[in-house]
Image (spheres, rainbow, N blue to C red):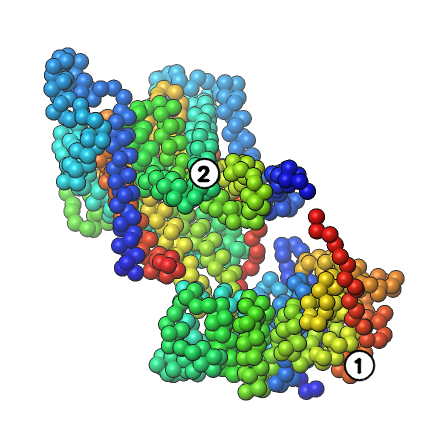
Amino acid sequence: MTARLRVRDLSVSFTRGERVVDAVRGVDLDVAAGRTLVLLGESGSGKSVTANAILRLYGRSARLGGAVELDGRNLLGLPASEMRRLRGRVVSMVPQDPSAALDPLRRVGDQIVEVLGLWGMARSRGAARRIAAEQLERVGIAEPERVLRSLPFELSGGMRQRIAIAIAVACEPQVLIADEPTTALDVTVQAQVLDLFSELQRANDMSIVMVTHDVGVARMVGHDIAVMYAGRIVERGPMEQVLSAPRHPYTAGLLEALPTPGVPRGSLRAIPGRPPGPGEELAVDACAFAARCRSAVAACWTHRPPLHTVGSDHDAACDVIDEPIRISFPTLERTEVA
Amino acid sequence: MPVYVLKRLAQAVPIMIGVAIVVFVTMKLIPGDPVAALLGPNSTPQSRHDLSQRLGLDQPLPIQFLNWFVSALHGDLGTSISLQRPAGSLVLASFLNTLVLLGAALLLALIGGIVLGVLAALHPQSALGRIVRGFTLFTISIPQYTVALLLLLLAVETGILPTGGMTTTGQSGPGTVLLHLILPAVAASITPMGGIARMFASSLSEVLHQDFVTSYRARGLASTAVLRHAIHGSVPALLTITGLQISYLLGGTLFIEVIFAWPGLGQLVYQAVSARDYPLVQAGVLVSALVLVLVNVVVDSAHAGFDPRVRA
Amino acid sequence: MSADTITRVVASPLPVRRARPRVRWGAETVAGVVIVGGLLLVALLAPLIAPSSPTSGDVSRRLFDLGTAGSPLGTDGQGRDILSRLIWGARPALIGGVTPVLIAGVIGATLGMVAGLAPRFGRSAIMRTLDVLYAFPAILLAVAIGAALGPGVTNSVVSLAVVLIAPVARVAEAEVLRVRSADFIDVARASGATRAIIAVRQVLPNIAPALIVYCTSLIGLAIVYSAGMSFLGLGVAPPNPDWGQMLNDLRQFIYDRPLLALVPAAAILLASVGFNLLGDGLKRQLDVRDGEVLL
């Protein structure tokens, strides 16, 4: 696939006092024009860090390694002023929490007009307000004038998320990074917002990187998926292929643990243990998932399997599994509630 | 917004009444018989009784309070025992001088506090940040009277600035007042400056870690613009701390004025305390507290102006 | 599980909200402990370490400067050795600082807890009443009460305690409100524990850290205020030594012996800094702040 966004060997380390924390290691990603890549993982997997790193939102506390190429240009090598000019216009982000994404003390209109001026999309305040109203309509807001005059706390969470999306896509960026855009929303609003993403993508051939921990959301919008664990990618490939025929025990575990329609109640199986936290020290020469893996063998503790091809465009980082894992659900076990 | 201001004013009224009650109660705490004290050891029971009746001291307490309160509303705050003049006019005249001093000190404290606060918030780990934090810790620990004494010492040793009073004898006009204002204003401003710097640094730092700041950056805003917005977001907290510092300044002015012989309310109260002139002490404290309540209404209204969420 | 078991389980104190990391003694905390500890020692050992009498002086030896043999910190207007007065002055300083905070702490914390756990009306009533005290500049209220009661250590302590009740109560109430919304309180209430039990066993341990930090810094402030009261003639009566009183005493000689007044000033400052450092250090141990600010 000809990728518009190519991430190669991305690593992000943070310095907290004297300690150095490796949050993301050796991440490779490809996103083509007009397609959505889902970054799936639990908290602490490094998915949000990856998303933020693409936009270079970290300052001196983080060390970034590797490359992030947008149409051939390495974003990590750009001078800060250049990068700033790309943000919002060429690469933009929809943040996670809609209530916190907007400045609580300024009217919505002022905030939008500000960036429109910054991006050179409007010459005068009047023109900017008109364009702002148009953008709000584009994301499905019915009374744009009223919303422009409002303060964020006067609006609902769904509305605020739409505004954040409107700001992010106003300049028709090439790449949109959405960090858990539906987590803080009600289920009914979630579907509307996800539809919105698809629409916008179709209209502008926009590439989307969507970070989420929700397999259901992933399925709804993603063309391709990359599963992250402990700061690394453990499996990636086309969405349906990975989800129906996973080749990494963690992916299979996620699918078995997450509620899916059709699966009988009470038959979910949780992955034992817990994922490593963001700062935890991990052995260099072992598979990070070994402690929780049903299929682990002795070799898993002495050697970290690299990502290797297991199908067309499908890679997985496991040496033990050599055929698609069948997702199975144990039979219902009744527990007495005392 | 006007509704909010009115609401605050309405809330302030019971507080002001409460303040009056507290001052009245402290007056009643004075041990001993005030009538006997006024008339001396050779007074007769009859003369004491007459005076007591005349002063209304034989009435039940709530009536006494009402009488006193009503008189106070008319500007009659009693008579200064030591100066034999109406306490009200003494307090008013000196309060104006205190206002000048306070205004200058507050201005200095705000400017210095904001600058230091921004520095400390932006460079938390660097040497500069540590120096600023150390300085602010020092300034909030140092009592105002110590700062005043140090500056006085400096003035005495170097002779650059006048060491006391509001004007130099023989001169008049804003120029000489300004010259005399410098030392006491600086002395008064140091501690509040530290307090404001600390709180502002803390609040700004918190704001800078909030998601909307990251949003601003993700939209491509320049650092200066982001900082501007962050400071704007910290103004409400700044207003809160300013309100507190004004309260502290009003109290601290007592010592500053005494040390620099600035003829304000603080010095008046000090002299009144030394002379056991209770009516004057109470009058001074009452006026200070009432003014402070009103100042707080103003500060709260400004706070609501900046942060409309408060009005909800 | 029987109701009895539930009550016992729920009534046991749940862990303080933040799990304490291994104790990190920052430089500030250490400095604070050293200063405060030193102060305590000096106060306790005053009779043993003071070189001469703090109250009687030789007028022929008045106003000696710093560094004079026999009186390293000089002598005051009545020939009394300043060093000795300084050492003995540590006692009223500590008493004047700690006692009001202790009293205000207990009363304020109780009021704050009652207010925080009370229904809306009761809480408003209590806090609004305290707001009245808050409306006064602290020192002025203390002066008003102190002037009325008359000079003396007890009166000064009482005045300051009254002034400090409102701030402590506010902090306590705010903390209680914060804790009150926590789930484990609901669990306790659902199990039928009485409000008193909830207050003492669940709420108190969780608001205690913030209160302790606040009160520690408040001691620093109280020391400054009580010295201020003595400065104004409302605290410790002469000839007993007290730093604030010494300050007022020595400032009249600022033209001839300017440095003498700095001695008690430095002592007050040191005590205040010490308690503030201690309070800051304690706070740091309970708070986690992240590093860099991004622009």
Binning the other alpha carbons within 10 Å of mark 1 as few (below 14), some (14 to 19) or many (20 upward) gives: few
Residue type for callout 2: Val
- Return the residue at label 1: A311
Indicate whether B275 appears above or below B289: above
Place residue A14 in its image quadrant: bottom right
Indicate whether C271 appears above or below C183: above
**B304 or A240: which is nearer to us?**
A240
Residue B290 lies, in percent from the top left, at: 25, 43
Tell me if B174 is positioned left or right of A171 in this view: left
Instruction: State which mark lies toward you, 1 or 2.
Output: 2
Q: Chain of mark 1?
A: A
- SS assignment at label 1: strand
Residue type for callout 1: Gly
Q: Chain of mark 2?
A: C
Can the viewer see residue A203 in this picture?
yes
Same chain? Circles 1 and 2: no
Residue C114 numbered mark, or none:
2
- SS assignment at label 2: helix
